[in-house]
Structures are given as C-alpha cells and as structure tokens.
C-alpha cells in the first residue's frame, strides 16, 4: 500500500487574505509565488496530500485557528507562529544567515556578526521549528512520509524523530549548500545543531551533486554522520506552464511587451530582486554590449521582469535601489527619442513574466550561485522564437542544461557582454537546433519524477 505523505515548507502554496466586502470581510486565497510553489503545487493538488506551512497574514491565522482549509485543490494546514518570532526566524536566521551562508553572499570583512540579537533570533528559529513539530506530531498519519523543504526547517527532524518513530523524514534543500570552509563561519554550536537536525532525516536531497557533496563535507568537518543523500533536480510542470502561456492574461501581457519594444530583439530575465541573482552585473554586461557592438544600439531591449522580494531586510531594499539607479544611469546614457535600452519592470506580474519567456531572443540567467533556477527550464518550454539561454555555471540547472545552453561565468562581465553579442548573432539554424535541444532537456523530468525520488528516498534503511 502506498504511504501517505505530508509536504512541509515555510511558505505555503496559497496565501489567505481578508478582503473588505459590503457584507463584511471575506477570506480569499491566492496562489503563492516562487519556484517551490510553481513546481509542486500542481502535483500536490493532484495527489491529495496535505501541505503544511507557516502563517504569514491575518487571513492565514484565521485559517490556522480553524484547523486548515482546502484551496486551489490542495489541503493546506497552517502553523500559527507569533509574528515577532516568525520575523526573527525568517529575516535574521533564514534569510540573513542561512541564505547568505549557502549562497556565499557575505562580505566577510564586515558580516556576519553573531551578537546577542542573533542569539535571540536563533532561539526564535528553534521555536518556529518546534511549532511545526507540534502540528506534525498531531496531524501526520501513521507511517506517513514527511517531506521537509529548505533551510527554514533544519531542526524539525530532531524534534520528530524520537516521538514519532513511525514517520519517515526526508529533507530537500532547494538552495546550494555551503562549503565546509564556510560552515566554519557559523557559531560552532549553531552549525552543529543545524547539521545534526539535517542528519536526523532518513535522507537529504539536493538539486545537484555539487550541493550534496558540500553537505557531506560539512558533516565530515563537524564529525557528524551524514544521512543518505540523493540528487533530484526539480522540474516545471509542462501542463501548468502551457496553460499559463496560452491564457488570455498572457496574451494581453505579450501585447504590452510588443508595444514597448516593437520589433526589436529582446534580451530578457525573469527573477526575484535578489542578491544572488546578479542583476547588476547583468545590466553592466548589457551596457558593454551597447558600447562594444554599436550596431545593436536601438535594435535590442533588455527586458528585466524582476519582482521585489524580502523587503523587510535592509540588504534587499538597498539592492533594489542600486538596481534602479544602475538601470537609470544606463538608460540616461543610451536612450534615444524612440528607444529605451532597459525596460525594468518590478511589478509582480506572473502572466507578464510568462509572456517575456515566450518572447525572448536571449534569456539571461546569470546567478552568482543558485540551488537550481527553474526559469532556465521554464523559458525553453514556452519560448516561441528559438531563443538562446545564457546560463551561469553556478546555477544547479547547469548540471542538466550545461551542454545545450551557453555557459557563463557570472562574475565575468566582459565575457557576459560577449555571450550576449554572440547569442544575438547566432545564425537562425543554430539557434533553432539549440532551442530544440533545450526544450527536450527541460522536458526530461517532471515534478512527478521529483516526488517519486523523495518517496523512494524515504525507504532508505537507517
Ligand atoms: O530557493 C528557495 C526558495 O524557497 C524558492 O523556492 C523560492 O523562489 C524562494 O526561495 C522564495 O523565498 P521566500 O519564501 O523568502 O520569498
């Protein structure tokens, strides 16, 4: 008999909001953004599993107090966490510490600083993991497989293991994993607690063997026995993508893009405004194209469809300002009466992002480090112009697409300009060949394969 499973992540697949109506407030559900949700939501809605996530809004808290809800075809159970505890755990530990650690984002001469406030935040992180554990202890069916997602919930398995030995616990890390040198930056006790928590799973999965290797090296470095590890890159759901690409909303957005860029070539990117995504070097590389290849002036537009993220963190707000000012100065320098070289769109508009993926001639995916990068797979699946993908060698997706995309060193701005120029000038036959190969490769795995890998990993003997 197949075993039931429960999916657990910090951000849920839907967000509940209270909307004012004439007859009183109404609870509405909106599907969440982000790679995890777009990859897994269609799958979970088909299999009837429960998705457990943290409360983030007042609407979420009402749902949590009612024991759960069904939305977008999914059973959702929300864990009520006091907002101040949540904020410390999410902002200080999840995003300023663990995200920076795994993506190598610290400027070590200045950050991090593990002070008293940080210690309080670590304790909030423990409390958050323990609130998830309480809900899971109570609601997980007998012999269920609990699929724990990401760095926000590293301590969960230690809290479940003894009390529910019937459960199988599988962790999946959607980010890169720090090298064994960098793990040494964390306070010893916190590094130990985190890795012991991860090692309490039956298995830990990663998008690529590079991150799995780093995880095992970190365990070795701290003398912790690594659990079974496995590699299972996530994939986009082709049906879900195709219905988004053929929707009337996407057609409207495609017309909007065409109106702004005319019949010029489009270099596009679709990302969160996120430090690891390397937006600024991308813009500087595009300016290098205009400088060094004057024939492309007025013939190409860089469409950056990038939406705000984690604005509770000063680093992200500052990064957004820097992005805006770099774009403004490039546009000031190069714009003509009828051409603006960079179209920076910071609205969180999913149909427009998909329209950009349909329309690109070149897709720039140049993160400085990325667990996978689903956009690199989604682009080729919906693109209609035999577009070329320029892909950072530091994205997990490079291990799957590296031989059919054009590889980039994300730090090498001159080489990135050259890669953009080369991609724009590739003969059409060659572009078609590459786009076809990318489509085949991007469609090779589905979210169902990813799920099957997680469930198989749960059967590992301990
Ligand atoms: O890479 C990890 C991840 O969870 C992605 O799935 C998602 O796009 C992103 O982080 C979202 O982060 P947050 O929940 O902080 O907005």
Image (cartoon, grey):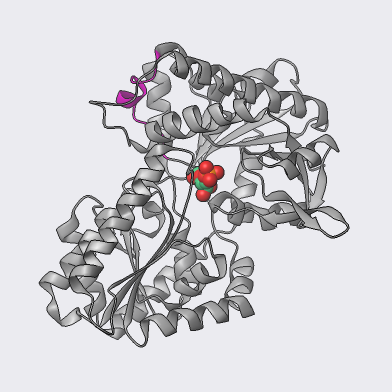
| Residue 67 in the figure: left or right of residue 18 | right
Q: Nearer the viewer, residue 365 or 381?
A: 365
Residue 186 part of the magenta-drawn span: yes
| Residue 391 in the figure: left or right of residue 384 | left
Q: Nearer the viewer, residue 89 or 18?
A: 18
| Whole-percent x, y for residue 434 in the image | 35, 74
Rendered residue at 66%/18% (across/down): 159
Rendered residue at 30%/24% (across/down): 181
Q: Quadrant of residue 457?
A: top right
Query: What secondary structure characterizes most of the magenta part?
Result: loop
| Residue 27 in the figure: left or right of residue 193 | right
User: On the rendered image, what quadrant is the N terminus found in?
Assistant: top right
Rendered residue at 47%/44% (across/down): 311
Q: Is residue 188 above or below residue 447?
A: above
User: On the rendered image, what quadrant is the C terminus found in?
Assistant: top right
Q: What are the residue bounds of the magenta stretch?
A: 176-187
Q: Is residue 311 visible?
A: yes
| Residue 222 in the figure: left or right of residue 256 | left
Q: Is residue 279 above or below residue 176?
A: below
């Amino acid at each position: 008999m197949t075993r039931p499973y429960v999916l657990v992540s910090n951000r849920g697949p839907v967000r509940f909001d209270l909307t004012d109506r004439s007859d009183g407030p109404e609870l509405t559900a909106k599907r969440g953004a982000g790679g995890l949700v777009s990859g897994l939501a269609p799958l979970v809605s088909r299999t009837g599993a429960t998705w457990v996530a943290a409360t983030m809004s007042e609407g979420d808290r009402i749902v949590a107090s009612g024991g759960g809800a069904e939305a977008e075809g999914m059973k959702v159970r929300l864990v009520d966490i006091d907002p101040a505890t949540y904020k410390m755990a999410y902002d200080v530990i999840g995003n300023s510490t663990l995200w920076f650690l795994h993506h190598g984002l610290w400027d070590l001469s200045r950050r991090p600083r593990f002070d008293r406030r940080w210690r309080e935040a670590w304790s909030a992180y423990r409390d958050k993991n323990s609130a998830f554990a309480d809900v899971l202890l109570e609601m997980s069916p007998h012999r269920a497989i609990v699929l724990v997602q990401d760095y926000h919930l590293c301590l969960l398995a230690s809290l479940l293991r003894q009390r529910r030995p019937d459960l199988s616990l599988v962790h999946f890390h959607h980010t890169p994993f720090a090298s064994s040198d960098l793990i040494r930056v964390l306070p010893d006790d916190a590094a130990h607690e985190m890795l012991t928590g991860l090692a309490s799973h039956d298995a830990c999965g990663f998008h690529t063997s590079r991150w799995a290797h780093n995880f095992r090296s970190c365990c070795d470095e701290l003398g912790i026995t690594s659990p079974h590890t496995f590699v299972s890159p996530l994939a986009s759901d082709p049906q879900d993508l195709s219905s988004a690409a053929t929707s009337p909303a996407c057609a409207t957005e495609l017309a909007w893009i065409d109106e702004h860029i005319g019949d010029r070539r489009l270099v596009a990117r679709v990302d969160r405004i996120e430090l690891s995504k390397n937006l600024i070097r991308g813009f500087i590389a595009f300016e290098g194209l205009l400088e060094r290849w004057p024939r492309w002036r007025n013939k190409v537009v860089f469409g950056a469809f990038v939406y705000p993220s984690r604005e509770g963190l000063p680093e992200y707000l500052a990064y957004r300002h820097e992005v805006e000012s770099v774009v403004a100065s490039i546009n000031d320098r190069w714009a003509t009466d009828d051409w603006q070289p960079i179209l920076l769109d910071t609205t969180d508009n999913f149909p427009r992002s998909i329209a950009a993926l349909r329309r690109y001639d070149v897709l720039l995916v140049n993160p400085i480090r990325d667990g996978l990068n689903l956009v690199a797979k989604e682009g080729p699946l919906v693109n209609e112009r035999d577009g070329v993908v320029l892909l950072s060698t530091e994205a997990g997706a490079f291990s799957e697409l590296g031989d059919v995309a054009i590889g980039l060193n994300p730090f090498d701005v001159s080489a990135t300009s050259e890669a953009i120029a080369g991609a724009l000038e590739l003969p059409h036959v060659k572009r078609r060949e590459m786009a076809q190969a990318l489509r085949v490769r991007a469609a090779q795995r589905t979210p169902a394969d990813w799920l099957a890998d997680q469930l198989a990993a749960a059967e590992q003997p301990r």
